[in-house]
């Protein structure tokens, strides 16, 4: 199945990533990593009258460090994987305070958080990478609601991916330069990972970046460098390809009241001038209706649920 994504109205960013559907506010959130920005925008009708929604005017919170991803908290507010820390964001006050941090090797290699997402048990998984992509300098961590940080995987180069099967028993994960998405057995009670094995490979034309899982257990993978999102069946066979008119496709997430929209982020950072000229839409957010529905967004379990402000 071949699909084509359409660009949305918000202006492009440098390294847009980490789309998240905020069901309580009916908004899409995403980040611009190196700019340290957290954006949000509501769905709106397209100006051309098409049946695919657009994103409306965005509002932005600026942090004082790169922000790899944001997650929604059960108690309200946001949790950000930013710099090499986990920050609670109070949007009303426009402030961010440190909630926890992993112990990062003191080897002089500058690192930052990259992709992050909550597991079905309400724990946040977040990975790191070196700014210069030093091989093996990153790791994947788990932040528990009590602030405990556990290292799950070390010797990672670019930690990416993160998505769970509909029953929560499997975790899909990508260390991008391997050009492979792996799958782990995931213990719902403890968050422990085991039995890592290959799930799907992207080939020589691109690297796996962020991903999303649908209700049928298919895995939708943003393929950096290929200008595509590729969907794989639970057995790892190719199911569908979404063409995106920007080569550096960074992530995707299901959104909308019915979770039947696929929101896709892209990046302009790192493109040569001639590539930028060939890809005027690079850095924008895109959308399509993929013929699948996504899973509800898991919240960080930091307290009893309450209405979002």
Image (cartoon, rainbow, N blue to C red):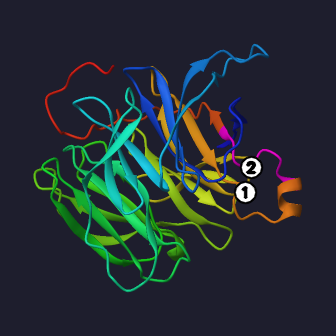
Q: What stretch of residues is rendered in magenta? A: 278-285
Q: Mark 1 or 2, which is nearer the eye?
A: 2
Q: In the displayed structure, would residue 246 be above or below residue 89?
A: below
Q: Which residue carries the number 1 mark?
A: 247
The residue that appears at 24% across and 47% down in the rendered structure is 168
- From mark 1 to mark 2, how far is it between C-alphas? 7 Å
**Mark 2 neighbour class, 10 Å CA radius: few under 14, some 14 to 19, many 20 or more:** many
Return the x and y of residue 46 as percentages of the image width and height: 71, 18
Which residue is found at the position 45% from the left and 81% from the top?
Answer: 109
Q: Earlier in the sequence, mark 1 or mark 2?
A: 1
Q: Is residue 74 in view from this perspective?
A: yes
Q: Nearer the viewer, residue 71 or 168?
A: 71
Judged left or right of residue 27, residue 184 is: left
Q: Which residue is mark 2?
A: 282
For label 2, the SS is: loop
Check if mark 1's residue and mark 2's residue have beta carbons within 8 Å.
yes
Q: From the image, which quarter does the N terminus lie in? A: top right
């Amino acid at each position: 199945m071949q699909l084509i994504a359409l660009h949305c109205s918000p202006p492009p960013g440098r390294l847009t990533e980490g789309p998240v559907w905020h069901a309580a506010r009916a908004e899409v959130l995403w980040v611009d990593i190196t700019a340290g920005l957290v954006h949000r925008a509501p769905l709106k009708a397209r100006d051309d009258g098409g049946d695919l929604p657009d994103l409306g005017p965005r509002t932005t919170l600026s942090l004082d460090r790169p922000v790899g991803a944001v997650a929604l908290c059960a108690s309200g507010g946001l949790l950000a994987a930013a710099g090499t820390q986990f920050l609670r964001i109070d949007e009303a006050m426009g402030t961010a305070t440190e909630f926890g941090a992993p112990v990062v090797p003191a080897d002089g290699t500058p690192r930052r958080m990259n992709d992050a997402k909550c597991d079905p048990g309400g724990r946040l998984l977040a990975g790191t990478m070196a700014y210069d992509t030093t091989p093996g300098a990153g790791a994947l961590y788990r932040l528990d609601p009590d602030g405990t940080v556990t290292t799950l995987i070390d010797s990672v180069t670019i930690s990416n991916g993160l998505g769970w099967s509909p029953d929560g028993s499997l975790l899909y994960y990508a260390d991008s330069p391997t050009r492979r998405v792996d799958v782990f057995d995931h213990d719902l009670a403890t968050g422990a990972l085991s039995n890592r094995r290959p799930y799907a490979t992207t080939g020589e034309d691109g690297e796996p970046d962020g991903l999303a899982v649908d209700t049928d257990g298919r895995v939708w993978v943003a393929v950096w460098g290929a200008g595509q999102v590729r969907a794989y069946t639970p057995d790892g066979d190719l199911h569908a390809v979404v063409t995106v008119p920007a080569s550096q496709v960074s992530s995707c997430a299901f959104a909308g009241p019915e979770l039947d929209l696929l929101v896709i982020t892209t990046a302009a950072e790192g493109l040569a001038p001639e590539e930028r000229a060939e890809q005027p839409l690079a850095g924008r957010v895109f959308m399509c209706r993929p013929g699948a529905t996504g899973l509800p967004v898991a919240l960080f379990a930091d307290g009893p649920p309450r209405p979002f402000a």
